[in-house]
Amino acid sequence: MKLWQKLWLLFTVIWVIVAALNVVSILAFGDEVEPRKALWPAFFGFVVPAAAYGLGWVWERFTK
């Protein structure tokens, strides 16, 4: 596993944990905020790490 993949994995774990905490807090206090607003952190919890991996993959191909 290359260094950028290890760093991506670390970033992904941290990002997903923070996104999950965001979703849980929105759902726990759903009476103050609409529960539908929990969809955005869940969406970005998956999209941002995928985009970061794609950028790393493209950068690796570009530099070879």
Image: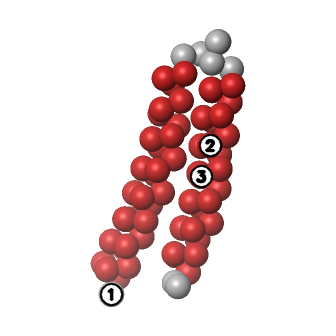
Q: CA distance from mark 1 to mark 2?
A: 36 Å
Tell me if mark 3 has few (under 14), some (14-19) or many (20+) residues whose alpha carbon lies within 10 angstroms of its own. some
Task: Out of 27 and 3, give the one closest to the viewer.
Answer: 27
Task: Out of 38 and 3, give the one closest to the viewer.
Answer: 38
Q: Are marks 1 and 2 in contact (CB under 8 Å)?
A: no
Q: Mark 2 is on which residue type?
A: Ala
As drawn, which residue projects farthest toward the top? 32
Residue at 57 percent across and 68 percent down: it is 9
Q: Are marks 3 and 1 in contact (CB under 8 Å)?
A: no
Q: Mark 1 is on which residue type?
A: Lys
The spot of residue 33 in percent (x, y) is 59, 16
Which is in the foreground here, disc 3 or disc 1? 3
In the rendered structure, which disc, 1 or 2, sits on the residue that comes first in sequence? 2
Task: Out of 33 and 57, give the one closest to the viewer.
Answer: 33
Whether 39 is drawn above or below 12: the answer is above
Q: CA distance from mark 2 to mark 3?
A: 9 Å
The spot of residue 5 in percent (x, y) is 51, 75
The numbered disc on residue 15 is 3
Tell me if mark 1 has few (under 14), some (14-19) or many (20+) residues whose alpha carbon lies within 10 angstroms of its own. few
Check disc 1 and report the residue beneath it. Answer: 64
In the rendered structure, which disc, 3 or 1, sits on the residue that comes first in sequence? 3
Q: CA distance from mark 3 to mark 1?
A: 28 Å
Whether 28 is drawn above or below 41: the answer is above
Tell me if mark 2 has few (under 14), some (14-19) or many (20+) residues whose alpha carbon lies within 10 angstroms of its own. some
The spot of residue 44 in percent (x, y) is 47, 43
Check disc 2 and report the residue beneath it. Answer: 20
Q: Mark 3 is on which residue type?
A: Trp
Q: Helix, strand or loop at disc 3? A: helix
Number of disc labels: 3
Whether 49 is drawn above or below 41: the answer is below
Q: In the rendered image, which quarter is residue 32 located in?
A: top right
